[in-house]
Amino acid sequence: MPIIFRSTPVTEPFMFESIGNHWMQDRVSRPGGFPFYHYLQTEEGTGRVDTDAGAQLLREGEGLLIAPFIRHSYESEGGGKWRVKFAAFTGTAERSIPQVMANRPLIFTDCTRGSEIGRLIDSSISLLASSPSDAMRLSVNCYAVLLNIADSSRIASQTEDRTYRDYVLPVIKEIENHYPLPLTVEELSRQVFITPQYLNRLFRRYLNCSAYEYLTSFRISKAKELLITAPRLEVQEIARRTGFTDASHFICVFKKAVGETPLGFRRMN
């Protein structure tokens, strides 16, 4: 039943404050919530999580992210065995997590998405057990866990909405598959046969941002990955690979979004 707590100062953009798996979970009650975003996923049995929003059962493979300082309690359902894995999140970019999660206080993940999240948690525990641990890979894994949870929020609430399926989802897939190309909102809107103005309204309705803001945010997230995982890659090449027209534009957009230049972000991490 490994449980690992962070014991060194955090220097990576995203890192696990604590992480564990194969844990036989007892009852927990936190009237004042927990100071970090934390995620709980059932490995065996069924758990019940109570918050001000009501009760949520977590069956095998299902999970729940809880935002900081949200009142909650959880325990096994019916007094049976409840084995879980969990993770809490911190990092130098911790303040960006609410934006990634669209400021949702709770996010449920089904067993399909939970399978990938669980694999990442298990992989991260194995990395932490090695000496020395690979801080760069751990940070990438942590970010991947957060992105998978965020995707669950978007998919769970919108999969059944025909407008989302017909107009927003195809554009998201086009951005995620072809972000290095010189995409524009005009071109993206033409692909789904609507005007750029209507596409932006739909993005704001479902994702709280314009289509252009989503495209830019996705490119920035990919640039962060390259800055961390490819430390010898030049900024000009990262700009090219993530769809920015030139390095100076990339640096300007990156600093506005992150608060650091790309090289500053790389040095910090």
Image (cartoon, rainbow, N blue to C red):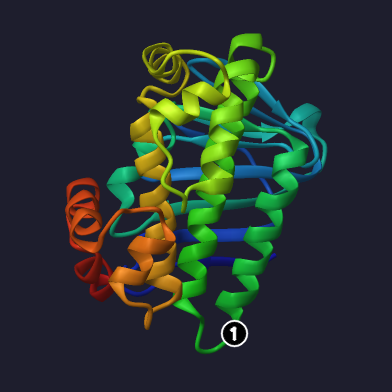
Residue 112 vertical position relative to residue 192 in the rendered view, above or below = below
Q: Quadrant of residue 242?
A: bottom left
Q: Is residue 146 above or below residue 196?
A: below
In percent of width and height, residue 267 lies at 24, 75
Image quarter hosting the N terminus: bottom right
Which residue of the protein is positioned furthest toward the bottom in this rendering? 131
Label 1 residue SS: loop
Which residue is drawn at the image coordinates 55% and 44% (left, top)? 176
Q: Is residue 42 left or right of residue 94?
A: right
Determine the residue positioned at 37% across, 66% down. 238
Q: Nearer the viewer, residue 205 or 64?
A: 205
Q: Position of residue 253 (x, y in %)?
A: 22, 49
Q: Position of residue 87 (x, y in %)?
A: 54, 53
Relative placement, left or right, of 91 versus 153 is left
Task: State the residue in front, 53 or 80.
Answer: 53
Quadrant of the snapshot with the C terminus: bottom left
The quarter of the picture where residue 261 lies is bottom left
Amino acid type, callout 1? Ser
Where is 137 relative to 174, above or below?
Answer: below
The answer to whether residue 259 of the structure is visible from this angle is yes
User: Disc 1 designates what residue?
Assistant: 130
